[in-house]
Amino acid sequence: MMITVHENLPPKGGDKSNLQTVYGKLQSELLEDLKNYNIPTKHNSMRTKQLWNWTFLGGVKEFSEIKNMPKELLNELSKKYTFTRDSITMEQESSDGTIKWLIDLASKNNSTNNQIETVFIPEKNRGTLCISSQIGCTLNCSFCHTGTQKLVRNLTADEIVSQLLIAKDRLDDWHRNNPNNIRKITNVVLMGMGEPLYNFDNVKKALLIMTDCDGLAFSKRRVTLSTSGIVPFIERVGNEIGVSLAVSLHATNDEVRDILVPINKKYPIRELINACENYPRLKNSSKITFEYVMLKDVNDSLTDAKALIKLLRNIPAKINLIPFNPWPGSNYICSDMEQIKKFSAVINNAGLSAPIRKPRGQDILAACGQLKSETLRLRDKK
Ligand code: SAH
Ligand code: SF4
């Protein structure tokens, strides 16, 4: 397979630690802050909108690129704010067009391990950006590569938004260069590194910024938060963020799920299903997606397929069957394709949709559950 490693990376961004990023603020926060500057009160809201537009439609990286705001104000703002993104340290493109960025985050705890991965998956009629919410993960799901990496820390809201801006920069996906508004990134999924619901406040803020209709304006249906099932937060996702929900179910009984997704010992299947049955959705909103990794002889019997149908009978659900993506040192084998197809057919026959997810970017370890900071991966090899 052909892997391209791109070398024309943008120069490393300046240090943003002493400044605040414009894109890490809610519009309401910027409005509030702009009141502290020398602006006629009646212009506050207009100036906030302008700043917001340049940030999220124009994709500007410098205050000097902004044309329709007073120079003195821009000068003042530049003392407190920046548009600097986090730095890309590697860009790899898979033979199937999937692109993976390794992003270096400013160290907040003197750790050398401050890298995350963001993946772009182009498809015929859409482009999905898979973003991370934590460096590492605390949850140790036994089939997941990220789970073998200890949690380093939660990402801040601006580090979550920054991943989207970086991808838009690299794909030249800014509105100002593309007046017909044909976007390359049409969907965002929180399916990279980390458990988003263990970083609820920052994830919430980042998603509210991405879905603000004056800016990036992602429809809430096109943004999906995937969780391993942190039950107490599920209702809050619906009420406070309102994006689509995906739940990593992976098993139909507690005995197996306790091993695959150990957080199940704290929030067992029945509690998780109850929370999903009560998930507050917008009217006619989309279904809940249940992710189900196909592991040979572990969770792939047709009895499991039938149990799944029964479990989800009261939920408007779609099941995503994910062929297991192996990684160095993993203890599982992917189910045979024949078996996955039979499993899918049983579910389809019951009237539920159960598409088989096509693995993408496997050659660059960008597929589900293969992400792990490159530094650690290299260390493991030694
Ligand atoms: N922590 C969140 C989101 C990130 S993982 C969660 O667990 O939902 C995104 C999806 O990839 C999850 O459904 C996860 O279970 C799945 N996954 C993890 N490792 C995998 C692997 N090796 N092969 C296939 N899917 C995997
Ligand atoms: Fe964490 Fe999700 Fe991987 Fe489990 S599957 S270890 S929750 S990233």
Image (cartoon, rainbow, N blue to C red):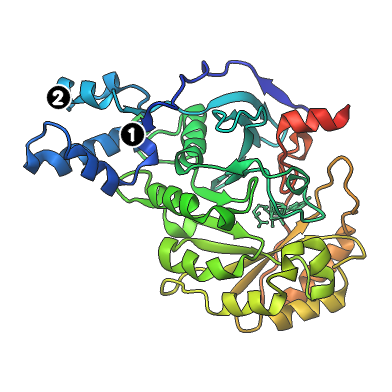
Residue 360's image quarter? top right
Residue 3's image quarter? top right
What's the distance in space between the residues labelled 1 and 2, CA to CA? 16 Å
Q: Amino acid at mark 1?
A: Thr
Image side of residue 6 versus residue 150, left or right: left
Q: Secondary structure at mark 1?
A: helix
Q: Nearer the viewer, residue 36 or 290?
A: 36
Residue 127's image quarter? top right
In the image, residue 128 sits, relative to residue 7, either above or below, namely below
- N-terminal of the pair, mark 1 or mark 2, is 1
Other residues around mark 1 within 10 Å, as few (<14) / some (14–19) / many (≥20): many
Q: Secondary structure at mark 2?
A: loop
Dots 1, 2 in contact, CB < 8 A: no
Q: Can residue 350 be spotted in the picture? A: no
Label 1 CB sits under 8 Å from any ligand 1 atom: no
Residue extending furthest toward the front: 109
Expressed as whole percent of the image width and height from the top left, the position of residue 172 reads 46, 29
Q: Can residue 153 be spotted in the picture? A: yes
| Residue with the mark numbered 1 | 55
Q: Which residue is drawn at the image coordinates 61% and 28% (left, top)?
A: 110
Q: Nearer the viewer, residue 117 or 188?
A: 117
Q: Which residue is drawn at the image coordinates 70% and 67% (left, top)?
A: 354
Expressed as whole percent of the image width and height from the top left, the position of residue 12 reads 52, 18
Expressed as whole percent of the image width and height from the top left, the position of residue 216 reads 38, 44
Image side of residue 22 versus residue 304, left or right: left
| Quadrant of image for the N terminus | top right
Q: Which residue is drawn at the image coordinates 28% and 23% (left, top)?
A: 79
| Residue with the mark numbered 2 | 70
| Quadrant of image for the C terminus | top right
Image side of residue 360 versus residue 60, left or right: right
In the image, residue 139 sits, relative to residue 214, either above or below, namely below
